[in-house]
Amino acid sequence: MNCPYCGHIDSKVIDSRDVNDGIRRRRQCLECGSRFTTYERLQPASLFVIKKDSRREEYDRDKLLNGVRKACEKRPLEAGAVESLVDDIETGLFQMGRTEVPTATIGDMVMARLKKLDHIAYIRFASVYREFEDITTLKEEVDTLADNMTFHSADQLPLIPPDEMTTIVKSPRRSRR
């Protein structure tokens, strides 16, 4: 390991610790005495993605990360939530033990996790991934999502209190004159 300060080739390891997906090493340069940190991560075997048109591409984490980031753009998510989601998907892909994975598998994994993370990001991703061709198909997906979720968020007050909402829904419509 070359010293980032003086470029000397030799350094000694002062401390090693296991971190999430690798090893963190604290090093000291034998020439200038400067200390620096390195991170070592196991590089998994190559994984190829089979596209819809049967082409094969090497798996690219950045491509997946960018797609998920676009779906989550301007959403109130915790810092690191997108990276954590992609880490989770990546771990699942490598745990499958296959060298080739269809894009549909990756897309389904993203959709399942986005559905739990943020409903708007889920719809955004779904609209591109499922290639909705008309508003009806999009509406069906939104309706399905709405049927399976609760509308009361802990950090947001409801627009209409629940007791008033039930009376509004039950009351007959009035016609204008």
Image (tube, rainbow, N blue to C red):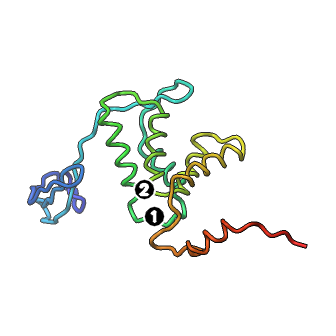
Q: Which residue is drawn at 19% across and 62% down?
A: 36
Q: Is residue 5 above or below residue 44?
A: below
Q: Which residue is drawn at 48% across and 45% down?
A: 111
Residue 65 spot, x, y in % from top left: 45, 49
Q: Please say if the residues under marks 1 and 2 sit with CB atoms less than 8 Å apart.
A: yes
**Side (left or right) of 16 relative to 64:** left
- The quarter of the picture where the C terminus appears is bottom right
Report helix, strand or loop for mark 2. Answer: helix
Report helix, strand or loop for mark 1. Answer: loop
Q: Is residue 60 above or below residue 84?
A: above
Q: Which residue is drawn at 18% across and 56% down?
A: 24
Residue 55 spot, x, y in % from top left: 52, 25
Res 60 → quadrant: top left
Name the residue nearer the viewer: 139 or 12.
Answer: 139
Q: In this view, does 9 lie above or below 98?
A: below
Residue 87's disc number = none
Looking at the rendered structure, the kind of residue marked 1 is: Leu
Q: Residue at x 32, y 36 (%)?
A: 94
Mark 1 and mark 2 lie on one chain; the one further toward the N terminus is 1
Q: Mark 2 points at which residue?
A: 82
* Residue that lies at the very extreme toward the right in this rendered image: 177
Name the residue nearer the viewer: 155 or 169.
Answer: 169
Q: Name the residue under label 1.
A: 77
**Side (left or right) of 36 relative to 75:** left
Res 79 → quadrant: bottom left
Residue 159 spot, x, y in % from top left: 60, 74
Residue 157 spot, x, y in % from top left: 52, 75
Q: Distance between the residues labelled 1 and 2?
A: 8 Å
Name the residue nearer the viewer: 17 or 135.
Answer: 135
Looking at the rendered structure, the kind of residue marked 2 is: Val
